[in-house]
Structure formats: structure tokens, C-alpha cells
Image: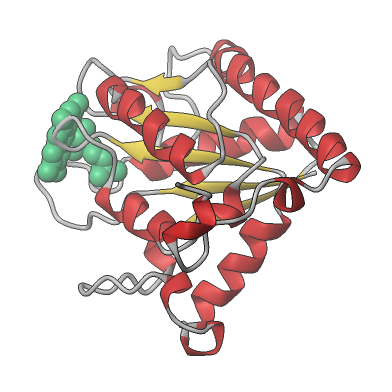
Amino acid sequence: MKFLVFLGTVRDSTPPKPARLGVRVVESILACLQSRYEEHEIELIDALDYPLEAVFKPHFAYPKSKAPSELNHLAEKIENADGFVMVSPEYNHSMSPALANLLNHFGSSLFSYKPSAIVTYSAGQWGGMRAAVAMRAFLSELGCLPVSAMIHVPKAQEVFEANGNPQAGEDQDAWFDYFGRTLNQLVWWAQAAREQRAQVDPHELVRDFRTHPSERNAP
Ligand SMILES: Cc1cc2nc3c(=O)[nH]c(=O)nc-3n(C[C@H](O)[C@H](O)[C@H](O)COP(=O)(O)O)c2cc1C
């Protein structure tokens, strides 16, 4: 199966230091996925690599040909993926606006009927839990229902080195076991959804909302 790991930090200003604390978190998540789920294809989608314009123009609001090519390529990747890992910092008790911006470019039809896993982190002691709870509603609306277990990394700067390796005194196996609780749920649901999508095309059963609210079958 194919999984996309979205990283939602684009902050290059300090303080607070270090900037892009999320890089070490996602490196550790990727290391866990690569060592424990090697039969699957894993790709990092870094929000920093995409043109996130100040004026919001969703990808689905204009013809594909007019969308920036990076977004067209990402749309294909989302369509072909079996599941998603969403890695976000917590800013003001909310998810990363850069991650929300990037995901908002795509209609739910691309994400739907595939599960997601929520990973949050922070420099403080709560590990981004408040952002994580809000991400449940956001991801549910996108159609990639989040699995029940979540990953939170408090004080990430004290847990991982910049390259994602554990800091002295941190037990990588213990962290990977903790990640595994969520990632195992993700892989299980992704497999189940993939098999069911092959049996019944959900887009035939429930029309996608693409251009007009009437597509939602609202009275
Ligand atoms: C604008 C802003 C708001 C923040 N709000 C929170 C918050 O609500 N909860 C929290 O635990 N940390 C908060 N922090 C601290 C972040 O956890 C810390 O800066 C972390 O490094 C952010 O991840 P990043 O470096 O990947 O951007 C905030 C940081 C910034 C810059």
C-alpha cells in the first residue's frame, strides 16, 4: 500500500527555538515506518515544498490545467494513496495553518474512504493534544477518517535529535512501540478500506461534492 506522510511546519523564524521542530518528529515517524512497515510505500509530503499562496485558490476551484503543477501532482498522489499520516505542530491550540492550507486545496473526493493518523508535537508538555482533537473534525470532513489512537510528542526538542534519532537516554524501541499503536490501526484500516473499495466503488455509491452543494443530495 501507499502512504503519504504530511508535514505541516513551515516556520523559519525564531524564537521560539528551534524552528521546524517537526522535522525531527517526522524523521522519527519515517524511520519507524521504514523499519516496521517496509512492505509499504511511504512518501513524505512537506508543506514547505508547495506554493501556498496568500490568496487562497483551492485546486478544485479551477480547471486542473490552471492549477500549479505541484498541486496537480500532489492531487494524483493523494488519489493513489491508501492512507495518510498528518504531522502537525500546535499553534494557539490549533493545527498548523500551513497544513490546513495545503489540505484545503483538495476536495474530499481525493481523501475519502481512506484512513488517516494524527501526529502532533510541541515544545511544551502537552504534545499538541488540543490541536490533535481539532484535527479529528477537520480530517473527518475531508473523508480520511482518523484512527482512534493518536501520537503526541511533548518537548520534542528533548526527545529527538534534529535528524530524528533519539536523544541520549531516550528509548527508540519504546517510542516506535508507541507509534506502532497508531500506525498499526492505520495500516489495518487502510487494508480493509482498500479491499472494500475494490468490491464496491464508494464514489458510485455516494456522489462526490465537486462543484455544487446539490451534489450532497441535500433537500
Ligand atoms: C505562533 C505560535 C503558537 C504556539 N502555540 C502553542 C500552543 O498552543 N501549544 C503549544 O504546546 N505550543 C505552542 N507553541 C510552541 C510550539 O510548540 C513550538 O514553537 C514548536 O517548535 C512548533 O513547531 P515548529 O517548530 O515545527 O513550528 C507555539 C509556537 C508558535 C510560534
Residue at 57% in and 67% down:
74
Q: Quadrant of ligand 1?
A: top left
159 or 126: which is nearer to us? Answer: 126
Examine the rendered structure and indicate whether residue 48 appears above or below residue 26.
Answer: below
Residue 16 visible in the snapshot: no
Residue 151: percent from left, percent from top: 46, 21
Q: What colour-coding does the image apply?
A: secondary structure
Q: Quadrant of residue 101?
A: bottom left
Residue 9: percent from left, percent from top: 32, 50
Residue 46: percent from left, percent from top: 46, 57
Examine the rendered structure and indicate whether residue 147 appears above or below residue 102.
Answer: above
Q: Residue reaching furthest front?
A: 219
Residue 31 horizontal side relative to residue 13, left or right: right
Q: Quadrant of residue 188?
A: top right
Q: Residue reaching furthest bottom?
A: 66
Residue 181: percent from left, percent from top: 62, 14
Q: Quadrant of residue 102?
A: bottom left
101 or 27: which is nearer to us? Answer: 101
94 or 175: which is nearer to us? Answer: 94
